[in-house]
Image (tube, rainbow, N blue to C red):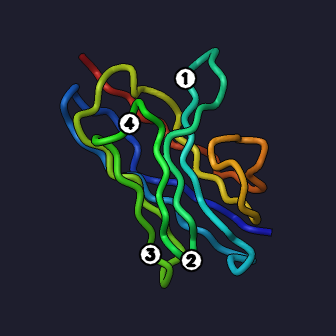
Amino acid sequence: QVQLVESGGGLVQAGGSLRLSCAASGRTASMYAMGWFRQAPGKERKFVAAISWSGGSTYYADSVKGRFTISRDNAKNTVYLQMKSLQPEDTAVYYCGTKRYSGTYSRPAEYDYWGQGTQVTVSS
């Protein structure tokens, strides 16, 4: 199994920035990619960004392209999500997940393990 722990969420004003971290432990050698998703109250979990663990290829939802950057530190088994120009519509609980195989990075069902989530609130 893989355990994931997110951190870095908080309250920020519109236009501000935050950096989320997700630290992985356990059977990390099985990880093919890691992704960030977000879920607003009453809404489904939506894809934000993903990164392949070996090659570092990155993928983004259209809504965050140019504002968010996903990166990884293989030595620390940690993935980051740098978020800039935050807007109220970015408010959600942000989850990181990891998947063992290639495929569709944007589908939550393809991820095997999830963290507990971290709240991001953007005030107008």
What kind of element bears circle 2?
loop
What is the quadrant of residue 68 in the picture? top left
- Mark number displayed over residue 40: 1
Q: CA distance from mark 3 to mark 4?
A: 21 Å
Comes first in the chain, label 4 or label 2: 2
Q: CA distance from mark 4 to mark 1?
A: 15 Å
Comes first in the chain, label 1 or label 2: 1
Amino acid carrying mark 1 in the image: Ala
What is the quadrant of residue 34 in the picture? bottom right
Q: CA distance from mark 1 to mark 2?
A: 31 Å
Q: CA distance from mark 2 to mark 3?
A: 11 Å
Amino acid carrying mark 4 in the image: Val
Comes first in the chain, label 4 or label 1: 1
Comes first in the chain, label 3 or label 4: 4
Amino acid carrying mark 2 in the image: Ser
Q: What x and y, as percent, mark residue 5?
A: 58, 59
**Residue beneath label 3, please?**
73
Comes first in the chain, label 2 or label 3: 2
Q: What x and y, as percent, mark residue 14?
A: 22, 25
